[in-house]
Amino acid sequence: MTSTATRTPHPPTQPPRVRRPSLLTLVIVLVVGGLLVHGWTQGAAVRPDSLLTGMFRLGEFAQDAVPPDVQRIGPILKALLVTVEMALLGTIIGVALSLPLAVLAARNTTPHWSLYAASRGVITVSRTIPDLVWGLVFVIAVGLGPEAGVLAIAVDVMGFCGRFFAESIEDIDPGRIEGLRALGASHAGVLLGGVIPACLPSFVTTSMFALESSARSSVVLGLVGAGGIGIELATSMTLLRYDEALTIILAILGVVVVFERVSAAIRRRVLGKVSGERWGR
């Protein structure tokens, strides 16, 4: 006769409790809370009465701006063309500069740690300083005009794309690089035969995002004297020509929408092609 062993039931486990926050977490929460309170009451001074008054002023602006004035549509379109050219040239130059910078800033492709540190520093500085500040710097350097805007966009794109290009290079399969090196491929051969083809879809999508951002930045850069449609918009707003300003705003909106549509179509095409190749279609 076999006897079944009696099993002692396990005591019920207690539900996980919220851990006591560390001192650093408490300090961060207090600092952020203090900034929010100070910003709401004194710093940014967000007041409901001012918001209500602002709504009425926006109504007055809309009343003065409608219908839009198209008498100066020729100069507006000419300035808009300059803005588009600024965005395209700045993005192309920035992407071209970010490619070698990303190779030096990736741990698996950089030739030396000093070049890695230097390239990472360049990317950090380019990304940290806003494009509006770069516009002011280049206006001082090369003078007023679209050239300063192109250079400002190029530096901003170089920092943006350089970071994401470098991260994309670091995320590729290590065996891809090691296999090419084992076959005796040179450093350039590894880059052209292994790294660039593997990262090309990511490079294209990141470049398209940079182009969308450049289309918006080129408008703002015109406000600091970097040329383009921003000067026309600032002049119209200063002279209280709100109907003309609305025409400029609608033209800017149309250009930005076109940039975003084209960029999205290119991204879908690239990602769809990569997905098809991956599944053997």
Image (cartoon, rainbow, N blue to C red):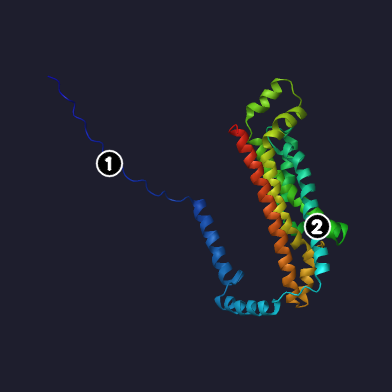
Residues 27 and 44: in front is 44
Q: Which mark is residue 149?
A: 2
> Which element carries disc 2, helix, strand or loop?
helix
Q: Residue furthest front?
A: 281
* Spot occupied by residue 59 in the image (x, y as percentages of width and height): 63, 78
Q: Which mark is residue 146?
A: none
Residue 225 lies left or right of residue 63; in this view the side is right
Q: Which residue is mark 1?
A: 12
Of mark 2 and mark 1, the one earlier in the sequence is 1
Dividing the picture into quadrants, the one containing residue 253 is bottom right
* Spot occupied by residue 109 in the image (x, y as percentages of width and height): 71, 32
Residues 70 and 238: in front is 70
How packed mark 1 is, by other alpha carbons closer than 10 Å (few <14, some 14-19, many 20 or more), is few
Residues 34 and 11: in front is 11
Residue 123 against residue 177 in the figure, above or below: below
How packed mark 2 is, by other alpha carbons closer than 10 Å (few <14, some 14-19, many 20 or more), is many
* Spot occupied by residue 214 in the image (x, y as percentages of width and height): 73, 55
